[in-house]
Image (cartoon, helix red, strand yellow):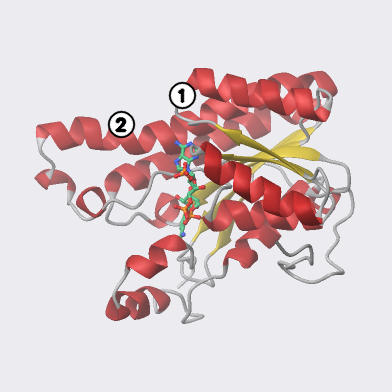
């Protein structure tokens, strides 16, 4: 295994106030969550690597720790399961000495063509109940479970930052009603937390992402890849590190007075 850093940006990456901060990135075993976790570590933070598969999170953590000693803790948990979330936070606090400086609610339900591309009136009774539940449980309930646990610690320490990963359909609408609903509800959760906990110096913000080249890109045919690239006036897919950079900024002290905001990271798709 190489112990040479494979930088997300470069060896000079740094953001004020990230060194020594402890936090959790949900869904960090692959895709954007993994790039977020790596960049946060690159900036000096210590990060709990979460995902549902114990072997994957252990391997990811081991690889990062080989370069940045003790910078990560692997912790498997299904964020849609409250007991597992509580266990995740217990382990995180044990590791960090009791503090949680940031939480990134990134875990999301996988792309499901049958759910994403069915107009609402064509949903069967079964789909309209269960289909919506599956997405909501991971994207929304999971974010709410994790936020409550994080807030319990953040209120005590009188500081903290939560970043939620939403999506442009939450703002513009799109085919894929269960996904749109869940991602829009996340913005409501984010705003509630931002208002309620600002006096405790806790900030909550969200990203609304356009088409970002993570794992799902590889499942698309060439025409679809091109079509989705052209949704943005930038005429390309976003890079995972372009999302991670915004997360790191929001967590850092540079963003200390940004609260309750949704930053749209889409190359300009929404304004067109
Ligand atoms: N890529 C895009 O274009 C795009 C656009 C808008 C918004 N987003 C949002 O960005 C986030 C990350 O997307 P991505 O494309 O990087 O996804 P991804 O490559 O599919 O990765 C998802 C991560 O979440 C984990 N995960 C899934 N369900 C989980 C659960 N119940 N509990 C804990 N971990 C769970 C996965 O690991 P395991 O499966 O091993 O648990 C994996 O680490 C998602 O919230 C997604 O909705 C993505």
Instruction: Identify the image quadrant of residue 164.
Output: top right
Q: Is residue 212 above or below residue 147?
A: below
Q: Position of residue 123 (x, y in %)?
A: 13, 42
Q: Position of residue 160 (x, y in %)?
A: 77, 34
Q: Residue at x 74, y 70 (%)?
A: 9
Q: Which residue is under mark 2?
A: 133
Q: Residues within 10 Å of mark 1 (few under 14, many from 20)?
A: some
- Which label's residue is closer to the chain start, 1 or 2? 1
- Please give the label number shown on residue 16: none
Q: Which residue is under mark 1?
A: 81
Q: Position of residue 143 (x, y in %)?
A: 53, 33
**Helix, strand or loop under label 2:** helix
Question: Looking at the image, which residue sits at the far front?
Answer: 1
Instruction: Identify the image quadrant of residue 49.
Output: top right
Asked if ligand 1 lies within 8 A of label 2, the reply is no
Q: Residue at x 38, y 69 (%)?
A: 218
Q: Residue at x 23, y 31 (%)?
A: 130
Q: Is residue 65 visible?
A: yes
Asked if ligand 1 lies within 8 A of label 1, the reply is yes
Tell me the mark number nearer the camera, choosing from 1 and 2: 1
């Amino acid at each position: 295994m190489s112990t040479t850093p494979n930088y997300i940006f470069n060896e000079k990456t740094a953001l004020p106030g990230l060194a020594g901060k402890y936090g959790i990135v949900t869904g960090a075993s692959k895709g954007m969550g993994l790039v977020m976790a790596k960049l946060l570590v690159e900036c000096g933070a210590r990060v709990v690597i979460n995902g549902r598969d114990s072997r994957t999170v252990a391997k990811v953590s081991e690889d990062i720790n080989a370069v940045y000693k003790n910078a990560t803790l692997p912790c498997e948990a299904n964020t849609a399961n409250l007991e597992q979330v509580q266990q995740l936070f217990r382990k995180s606090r044990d590791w960090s000495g009791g503090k949680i400086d940031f939480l990134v609610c990134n875990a999301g339900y996988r792309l499901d063509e049958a759910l994403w591309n069915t107009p609402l009136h064509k949903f069967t009774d079964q789909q309209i109940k269960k289909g919506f539940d599956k997405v909501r449980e991971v994207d929304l309930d999971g974010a709410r479970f994790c936020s409550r646990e994080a807030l319990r610690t953040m209120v005590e320490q009188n500081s903290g930052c939560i970043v939620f990963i939403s999506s442009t359909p939450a703002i513009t609408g799109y085919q894929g009603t269960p996904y749109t609903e869940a991602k829009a509800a996340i913005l409501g959760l984010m705003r509630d937390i931002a208002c309620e906990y600002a006096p405790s110096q806790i900030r909550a913000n969200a990203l609304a992402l356009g088409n970002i080249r993570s794992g799902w890109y590889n499942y698309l045919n060439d025409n679809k890849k091109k079509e989705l690239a052209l949704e943005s006036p930038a005429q390309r897919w976003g890079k995972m590190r372009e999302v991670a950079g915004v997360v790191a900024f929001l967590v850092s002290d540079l963003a200390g007075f940004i609260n309750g905001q949704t930053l749209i990271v889409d190359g300009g798709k929404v304004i067109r």
